[in-house]
Amino acid sequence: MTRRTIAGRAARLALVAPALLAASCSPSPDAASQKRQEFSIGWSIYAGWMPWPYAQQAGIVKKWADKYGIKINIVQVNDYVESVNQYTAGKFDGVTVANMDALTIPAAGGKDTSAIIMGDYSNGNDGVLLKGANSLQAIKGQQVYLVELSVSHYLLARALNSAGMALTDVKTVNTSDADIVGAFASPDVKAAVAWNPQLSVMKAQPGVTQVFSSADIPREILDLLVVDTATLKANPNLGKALTGIWYETVALMQRQDAKGKEARAAMAKLAGASAETFDNQLKTTFLYADPKAAVAATQDPSLITTMTRVRDFSFSKGLFKGASSADAVGMSFPAGKTLGDPAHVTLRFDDSFMKLAADGKL
């Protein structure tokens, strides 16, 4: 199973100035703000996003789309980077995306984007590994293999900070997610950062200790469903239908009876994984199955703290092309709170649809 790869995408997308990408590829504001009947949502394989294709297969997408008189196409893109690229270019009305990428790709490129579903957070799916040592302090001075400009890079920065160190205390070695398992198998490689499923394979090697993981920074590596803001404003029924689809499907997959097991097995098959592998990944993925919990997480001040850390890291690594400060990309949160330039808000954490679900009003 392939986990969403934050930095492959960031590294490759950083080669294109986001503002230019948005200007040349995005549909005009007039086109996005039209009332429509048919919509497309992009997704890529990751444990926390498998409810979407399953919902389409099981008829749940059609059920909620019919309720609101619309049609929703749930479209798989084999490459995560490409799915976010296509959304940014206007080929999709929404996409499954991690918080770091929502900020550094569409939002930084000027595409006004609303995060309407707080889907999950990594609760151990990402980890820092050392050979022959069981303390994070031993990483100082080491070469650390990881996908640079990715969630792994961000996790490393947070791990070092927790131990009174900085990124300057190590040397990172850019390694693709496809190559990192093989690289870590070399006796010369003593430190690495990875995500599942690669992480679980690497942890199983003799003498390897996980010294830090995303479970140590809960609610920071977030997985979202985002929708083009203009499209959402003109077509609020799209937001309602998508929210209904999500919570019905997640409630089903979390059931501990035959129906729940059947749903999870179907999701595993769609992801090209065994049922056991899929269930193991779910154990380190905190799904917001309860809309009330998702609303509370979106309203919690810690979300602003998290996004401050994410944007500061992203800016420091040059992911806000052409920006003179980290404040260049504005973000908004519930209750009118903002971060960065309030006159140029392009990433909005919108809890209104999750509230409807929490109040039973969908």
Image: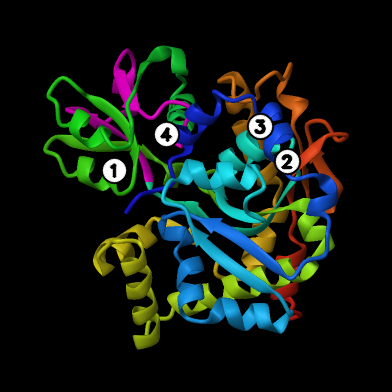
Q: Is residue 322 above or below residue 62?
A: above
In the rendered structure, which amino acid carries the disc numbered 2?
Lys
Alpha-carbon span between mark 1 and mark 3: 33 Å
Q: Is residue 5 above or below residue 282?
A: above
The residue lying toward the viewer, choosing from 228 and 155, is 228
Q: Secondary structure at mark 2?
A: loop
Q: Nearest to the eye among marks 4 and 3: give it.
A: 3
Alpha-carbon span between mark 1 and mark 4: 11 Å
The residue lying toward the viewer, choosing from 71 and 241, is 71
Q: Quadrant of the rendered structure where residue 280 is? A: bottom left
Looking at the rendered structure, which numbered label has been put on residue 152? 4
The residue positioned 21% from the left and 30% from the top of the image is: 184
Q: Secondary structure at mark 1?
A: helix
Q: Is residue 123 above or below residue 108?
A: below
Q: Earlier in the sequence, mark 2 or mark 3?
A: 3
Q: Residue 61: give x, y in percent of width and height.
A: 57, 76
Q: Earlier in the sequence, mark 1 or mark 3?
A: 3
Name the residue carrying label 3: 21
**Can residue 51 be found in the magenta stretch?**
no
Residue range (magenta):
126-152
Task: Answer left or right for 220 relative to 107.
Answer: left
Name the residue carrying label 2: 111
Name the residue carrying label 1: 199
Alpha-carbon span between mark 2 and mark 3: 10 Å
In the rendered structure, which amino acid carries the disc numbered 1?
Leu
Task: Answer left or right for 63 relative to 351.
Answer: left
